[in-house]
Image: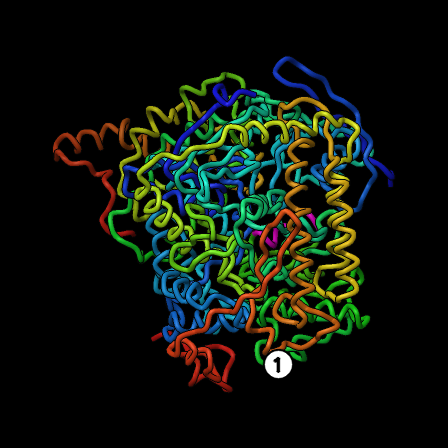
Amino acid sequence: MNIETMETHSFDVLVLGSGGAGLRAAVEAASEGGVSVAVIGKSLLGKAHTVMAEGGAAASIGNLDAPDSWQTHFYDTMKSGHYINNYRTVEVFAKEAPSRVLELEQWGAVFDRTPEGLIMQRAFGGHSFRRLAHIGDRTGMELLRTLQYKAISMDIKVFQEVTVTRLLMDGSRIAGAMGYYRSDGHFVLFKAKAIVLATGGWGKLYKVTSNSWESTGDGAAMAYRIGADLKDMEMVQFHPTGMVWPPGVAGLLVTEGVRGEGGLLYNSEKERFMVRYDPERQELSTRDVVARSIFKEVQAGRGTPHGGAWLDISHKKADFIKQKLPGMYEQFLTLGDIDITKQPFEVAPTCHYQMGGVQAQAETCATTIPGLFAAGEVACGLHGANRLGGNSLADILVFGRRAGIAARDYAGALKSDVTIDESVVEAEVARVLEPFNRPDGENPYAIHEELQAVMSAHAAIVRSEDDLKVGLGKVLALQERGRRMGTSGSRVYNPGWHAVFDVENMLMLSELIIRGALERKESRGGHWRSDFPDELPEMGKWNFVHQYSADGDRVQRVPVPEMPPVLAEICARPVAPGRESAAGTSQVPPRKG
Amino acid sequence: MAEEFVLSIFRGDAEGGEEVEYHVPRIEGMVVLDAVHHVQAHDAQDLAVRWNCKAAHCGSCSAEINGMPKLMCKTRLDEYQGETVHIQPMRTFPIIKDLVTDVSWNYEVAKKIPAFNPGVAAPFHMQQWDVDRIQEFHHCIECFLCQDVCHVLRDHHEQDEYYGPRFMVKMAEFEMHPMDRADRIPQIKNEGGIGLCNVTKCCTTVCPQHIHITDNAIIPLKERVADRYYDPIRNFFRKLGGKDENAKQETPT
């Protein structure tokens, strides 16, 4: 293919990913004019995985609990992340989240209201105060739709259903990306001075997952291949409550909002087991603890008929449940034949979120590649070893905006245009078309299914050295077979062809997860090693960073950044800031006014 | 209970095509989308289908199942016990391939709707009952099933005259927002073409989010258009007083 005839676009700022982080970045990059901005999405606009977020966006607005503050949000987030988070990222996040949520209201999002007419906030696991601004149980959809309509009202070019297969460099800096239109398979080249990576996570590498098909880790894998550092890859979040039955819907998310609104967990002996595992926070403990507790109950023979725990909110009034959790009510009624206002239902852990990802600076979201910025789930630094519910929606707002600013400034400061090596483009075209030369090659769907089985068996909620090593061998063998994936049919909307590149990316990231998990010889947050069951202070000093090399993955340990005294003092407190008076007396914090 | 389901899926493109039969083993609780995925993985890798979340949040997997516009992820196969399940793409939009259609017209319409325009800075003071009725419209997942079934678009092809139910809901969402200050009535009447809707409620019937599109969005907007343009008494006073009594109030009621 001749690069001269290839469809080519040039932008100052190119955003990869049309979810919440990507759209928020694009809106910011375009907000001052004079900078050309484009967003590329693998799906249609407004369909990104952000729509699956249910519970809310965490921000210490304090509409219900006045003592809440950024310090408390900082304290909770560091504690939940088991202190391997980048403290500066957390500080920026906790300070800016309230403004970002209010901004959404300004742009048309309609949050549920308090009796005083302000944004309603709900309790969630690991948050010291009622903190999650929400709209029933469909907060992510509201957030995405608001940003979508904001973006299309601005001068932002949107490319829908375009798969990007490769990031392009100009020397050591970023220069663009290339890919193809899914609808007809024709190639497209993007030249860009700055790129914001907002491509989300890779939950699709597990069999039981709450993630949508898009979560195949394309951005992280592409960034890794051009030399960006990836960090904390072993940190995978399993959400404690996914649907279990019927099997057709296994893994589908049951929002933490059910517990936030008062839902209780029971084992088969009708015992509220969370009281035993976390007497203080009980059902509203952090996700790593609740998921592990459910897992342990099932292991101990106290699971439900289909291997989970009972979640029950039927003690609340039916009208209340239908108003606060309408999506859950409908989901169980139509897909599971269960009326959650009348009966308990089965839940079990489901792969939900990646705390690890592309290492990004706190203030600018800059990665280790000049001109490449990362925001949202693909980025790493905020969540540490375990993400708090509600922190991801706030994350994409805070760091989507910051990545947009930084990319805009970076592009504006560049004097010269980028140059792209034509031979790289030609080689990529040949590589992307290769699967058509192997109509009888390996079936990408089959490889994906096998990969999910391997990851679920060897690198999921519980891990051990022996198991991980066996898993690594299997993943490497699958990578070998993956080189022979083939497809048939034409380039017109051909999901079998598209799947080849998704699976390639997942095969690569699976290896990094296992290698990271082997290095972290302790249990911390979402990473639970049966052979090292304790959290070890020595290991808490390190993050594990992955670098691509021709000879394979290089894992290095780098020190966790040390907090300045003023922040260390906050983390060292025996109780969360603002909760001093409530400590030991009541679960429910005092109401404002 | 049968051990397998029989699916008859449209295969083809703008040049034409036909239904092809596939057999899929039965799994308890499976939805139509699961069966389509099974076909993709085992029988037809290149079978084109859009989907994202498989949880009825994203509105990607719209199709016509035994003639009814539905989300494939929300339609249980056991509803069709003993029947062949015919799956066709949405008919109102140009086909790309198999079950995937070109829905780009909807995104063009979306761009014509002026952004939310509040008169004041957030935080807003709004009571829950101020926002209850617009929150219903925010449930929309943009699956475009209402656009697919709307006879103005489907049978009369008046895409240039009428925005369709989805965008009446969107206009209603902004128009009824207590803080919005834009005057949207002329657009709703003229370019939006609300008069073309003759209230057959097909859109409401197929809405997977159970939005009362006709009753709660379109009819109230029709009333506002009628008040503005066709109420002789109001017109008389408007001319007399020289002011527009439809202008929004400064504070939410």
Q: Quadrant of residue A534?
A: bottom right
Q: Nearer the viewer, residue A101 or A422?
A: A422
Q: Position of residue B226 (x, y in %)?
A: 32, 30
Q: Quadrant of the N terminus of chain A?
A: top right
- For the residue labelled by badge 1, is the local secondary structure a helix, a strand or a loop? loop
Above or below, comparing residue A491 to residue A328 in the picture: above
Q: Is residue A333 magenta?
A: yes
Q: Nearer the viewer, residue B185 or A243?
A: A243
Q: Quick one: label 1, few (<14), some, or many (20+) residues within 10 Å?
A: few
Q: Residue at x 78, y 51 (%)?
A: A474
Question: Magenta-highlighted stretch: main secondary structure?
Answer: helix
Where is residue A392? Give x, y as percent.
Answer: 50, 57
On the rendered image, what quadrant is the C terminus of chain A found in? bottom left
Residue A127 visible from this viewpoint:
yes
The reply, left or right, for residue B221 in relation to residue B50 is left
The chain under label 1 reads A
Q: Residue at x 27, y 36 (%)?
A: B183
Residue A551 placed where, x, y %?
66, 49
**Residue A468 at x, y percent in the picture:** 75, 61
Disc 1 residue type? Answer: Pro
Is B226 positioned to the left or the right of A140 in the image? left
**Circle 1 is placed at which residue position?**
A279
Q: Which residues are magenta?
A: A327-336
- Give residue A339's quadrant in the image: bottom right
